[in-house]
Image (spheres, rainbow, N blue to C red):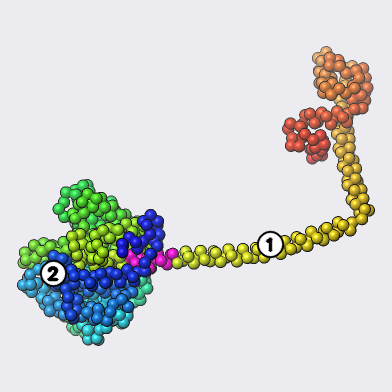
Amino acid sequence: MSVKSLVAGGVDSTFTLYRDYSVVGKEMKESFLKSKTALAKNAERFVFKLSDSNDKEGILGLSYGSFLLLTLLDRFDLDSAFSLDEKKKLHNSIMELLAYVKNHGFDVSPFSKDETNEKFFKGGRTSFIESLTWSMSCFLYARRMSKNKLLDFEQDELDDMTEMIAKSLVLLVDNVIRPNGELGYVEGCEDYLGWGPLTGCLEASLYFTHSVCETFGDIEDTMLGNAELGISKDWEFIAKINEACSKLPGKQRKGGGRQIDIVDQFQQICLVVGKNVFKKYEKSLGKKFFYADGSEIQNNEQISYSLQSPVLLNQIYVVLTTIYVNYHNKVREDEGEEAFKELGAILKNAVDMVHETYTDLRRKGKENIVNREYATFTEKHPNKEIGQKLGGERINVAVLEALIIKARAMIITYVSKYPEKEIGDVLDIIEKTRAEDDWLWSHVGYDLQQTERSISAIREFYDYYEGYQKACAEKNSEDLQAIKDDYESKYQALSEGLKSAQANYEEQLRLMEERYKTQTETQVQEIKAQYKLEGVVREIVEETVKTSFVDLLTSTLDKIAQDNKTAKDTLGENEKKVKESISNFVGSFLLPFNFSVNNVRANSAWAESDQELLETMKADLSSFIEEWMYQVCRKNRPGAQDKETVLRMLFDDKNQEK
């Protein structure tokens, strides 16, 4: 099955899970266990080979392989998919890992010669951080499987694993690097830098710091609690770890029996380290690629000319470290929601830049330059001989493709919390690097570490899907159903209401028809008479309006006439011209309407008798007023085309002025 078929076609912003995650997990488990290259046969336990080209097991093979199967059993709901024999073999493999650590320490097998491992790592004098973190994660998850009744362990086996987890925590706490080459926990310290590849290193390595913080994430999932995954804090187990720690010898544990909260100390250290790592590289994240010391690569073309470069991986290490130690939650708590969102955007931009650059290099056939990181041992260490003896080893510790998908899934699960369509593109990268028809990964053949990383990345996708996207989809489905139910309920009520209204309407119509049929001719005549009366009233109103305007203009003209008569004999020549103009002005309004106005001419003065003019005008003044007002106002007032309306409006205006 293609990994890409896990998600919808790659353009939508939401996912549709086509197959149940337990089915996918079962396929991965069966493909892994039946592979001839993946496993050497052993009647009692699994023997994990590192790759096609390296058939030696060692601590890294045991820890990678055991953790891979524990991941499937824990995160892919595979209790029923593992046979009793497979569970027994897994149990024995974990116990073999525990026995190896007791006898040989956290060495670099199978990469280094046996005598080198014996000289530097046996007895716990020095530990390879990669072996320590992977082994501790195996023991943490094995105990969780026992608690969830997925694997059976005896109590003394659980106690031995608890003691080894405590020893591992002590090593990490005592070997965290502080400025000026100092090591170890100091309460309230804000200057922790991280960890190197070996205990005792005085210079922090970005990858191994990331590896330790990744194990802190496993401690959260199995001991401290993870609200996102619904995991509660295991106080009983924490107490057992601290009790085992208090019995161990060490510079901070002298005077046995004193209770040391090693879990709390480790948590404090990781929180400070995560903050310092982010702050150191913050200015470059999502903008420039950088080396482990923080110096930026000015031109991405420089990467193409390299033989091997971890610069793309460096961005992913910072992103994952920031999330593993919950620095994003610290930002939200201290600086607020906006700072939290800004941090999420920075982390996402960093992963986007890595993915785009890697895709471009892969298109050019140069992906091998950036897709792996190999551990080297030239870092500062008090024992110079270690660097000389291990300097030639190349131990693969990181695979870019799997870390990209893991980073994306963790950002959207813990920081951004939004549907992330690009995750399908990265799953496609993982798909293209696995063996055909097998759930095994490598560019050139089977590789145990890359297979574990890839399956773990797919697990992170399912954690995201199950914990966030699926819940969103279910909520959307519930909301849609609620809307549908509400619509159907309202539709039903409306339908019933319409039926009732229709029945009521038909009944009213029937009653009206009956009343109409029973009406007498007298009632009809009364109605007609009523309408006739209303018509008479309207005529009276119209006449009243006209009369009012006639009276209004008559009084005005009468005043003009009286004034003319009084002033007639006293006017001078100029005043008479004015008088003549007034007469012509009035005449110009009368003549166009063909009114019978005697003794009025366009070029005449006032009539011999102003009173005669007044009486003549008044005789037909009602018609004059009506027509004149209609002509003057019809273009300027709404409804002025109707003469009656014009008269009513003018009458109303005059009354308002009064």
CA distance for labels 1 and 2: 81 Å
Dividing the image into 4 quarters, which one contains the C terminus?
A: top right
Q: Closest to the observer: 433 or 368?
A: 433
Q: Which residues are magenta?
A: 460-473
Q: Position of residue 514 (x, y in %)?
A: 85, 60
Pointer 1: residues within 10 angstroms few (<14), some, or many (20+)?
few
User: Image check: 496 left or right of 236?
Assistant: right
Of residues 634 and 399, which is closer to you in this image?
A: 399
Whether residue 328 sits left or right of residue 445 in the image: it is right
For the point 27% across and 60% down, the residue is 430
Residue hosting label 1: 498
Q: x and y percent of residue 446 in the render?
A: 19, 65
Residue placed at 30% from the left, 80% from the top?
A: 150
Picture quarter containing residue 323? bottom left
Main secondary structure of the magenta stretch: helix
Which residue is painted at 30% across and 58% down in the image?
428
Q: Tell me the SS state at disc 2.
A: loop
Task: Estimate the x, y position of residue 582 in percent, counting from the top left.
Answer: 82, 20
In the displayed structure, 548 sits above or below 16; it is above
- On residue 97, the disc is none
Residue ID at (23%, 63%): 435
Q: Nearer the viewer, residue 252 or 24?
A: 24
Quadrant of residue 600 in the image? top right
Q: Note whether 92 is above or below 556 in the view shown.
A: below
Q: Would residue 652 appear left or right of 82 to someone viewing this image?
A: right
Q: Position of residue 294 (x, y in %)?
A: 21, 55
Q: Which residue is mark 2?
A: 55
Going by the numbered disc 2, the residue's amino acid type is Asp
Q: Residues within 10 Å of mark 2 (few under 14, many from 20)?
A: some
